[in-house]
Amino acid sequence: MAKPPIMPTPPLKPATHPLERLPEEWSDVLGAWGEPRYRGAQVFGWIHKRGVFDPAEMKNLPKTLRARLAEEGLSLPVSPVVGPPAGDDTRKVLVTLHDGLSVETVLIPELIRPGEEEELEEGWEPKKRVVTQCVSSQVGCAMGCVFCASGVMGLKRNLSAAEIVGQALAGRAALPEDQRLRNVVLMGMGEPLANYDAVARALMLLTHPDGLGLSWRRVTLSTSGLVPELDRLGRDFGGKVQLAISLHAVDDERRSALMPINRKHALRSLVAALKRYPLPKRRRITIEYTLMAGVNDSLEDARGLVRLLDGVPIKVNLIPMNRIEGSELRAPSAEVVERFREELYSRGAPAFLRTQRGDSLAAACGQLALRGEGRKVKRRPLPKAR
Ligand code: SAH
Ligand code: SF4
């Protein structure tokens, strides 16, 4: 028999919404109502595994308990509006929150390569296409990165754990029959480590085997590099959370101009934190590098990246800059991008290109909710590429 997964036990702040309760916490609540503890896992399973919020449908619960749960109110704390599929089946979901603010989440089915269609049809049970969901952690973002729509918007507020996991529950419910939610990346709006407590609880909810049951290897947190919180994440979760680090420049002068957080946590201290992160064997840290023409796209930058991260097991995701309103920053030509990628590869850093199509996680994330905001990017002079 397969061993049950070992769950990390991070210290968590108390749940603030019924959707945030883990099975044990449900047992405590139900225990106080005079119910046996095992009902906790049942209620949790109805909500998080089956996506059922109406207690009337929770067939294995006694009527009295269903009535009590109905009083409690178990609705999804977000209202999703699923957009039409793009050419590659990627779909954006606009999620409205109780206070009228909104965030976005994106469903990205794995691409089917030519020739693979038949394989999907074969057998009694056609293979389901696996889907990656890009989830937001805040409304807007306080980090102020100059190339990012969320940064331009500024921080409106943190999302609760219920609102974060609610995006995944809404996303999963929106999938067609032949698709299966397998990966969640915290790469939408917001800086997840600036909303640590809600994100930590959301991670526990997303990966609980009685709920959505995502594998820890399939949950990725993307951060601009908040060093103390990175250390805390490593400690609290024993390195189980997959990391993606937004690097974007390999010297402090340029990184600080692009990403103000670098003035607080400079590259040396970020790299030291990555070296300390208790990364499991054979895993790599993803380095996200948004290529901006004339800013960070020289071959010397590629070499600098490899030197800077020497000793850290990495793979690099190259994201051609996705233009945002009011900013002059743009992607380099396809040739420049390819040469940059090859330079990394030839120096032993596996590097992959995220294109600007819908399947680009970064291109798909962080753009939608800015529309209608009407704010312009502040013009700041950027240091030139070396
Ligand atoms: N705050 C986190 C996660 C959200 S941003 C972080 O910064 O890592 C997700 C990714 O999208 C980051 O790597 C970010 O740098 C990138 N990104 C943001 N705006 C972009 C744009 N206009 N073009 C390309 N990548 C962008
Ligand atoms: Fe925030 Fe990430 Fe955008 Fe920077 S790139 S402003 S950290 S969401």
Image: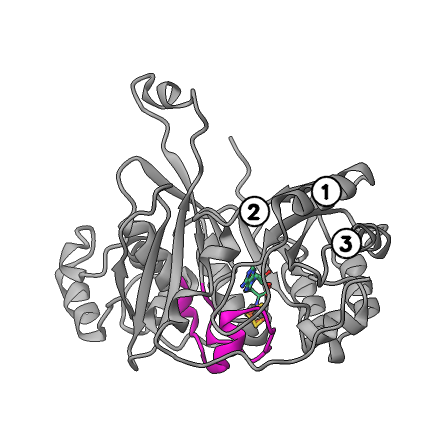
> Which sits earlier in the primary sequence, circle 2 or circle 1?
1
Q: Position of residue 269 (x, y in %)?
A: 81, 70
Residue 176 vs residue 323, the one in the foreground: 323
Q: Nearer the viewer, mark 2 or mark 1?
A: 1
> Which sits earlier in the primary sequence, circle 2 or circle 3?
3
Kindly identify the residue that appears in the image at 53 percent across and 46 percent down.
355
Give the side of residue 311 with respect to residue 376, left or right.
right
For label 2, the crowd category at 10 Å Cα-Cα, with few meaning under 14, some 14 to 19 and many 20 or more, is some
The local secondary structure at tag 1 comes to helix
Residue tagged 2: 354
> Quarter of the picture for ligand 1?
bottom right
Q: CA distance from mark 2 to mark 3?
A: 18 Å
Mark 2: which amino acid?
A: Arg
Mark 3: which amino acid?
A: Ser
Quarter location, residue 353? top right
Residue tagged 1: 339
Residue 9 vs residue 90, the one in the foreground: 90
Quarter location, residue 346? top right
Q: Which residues are magenta?
A: 136-165
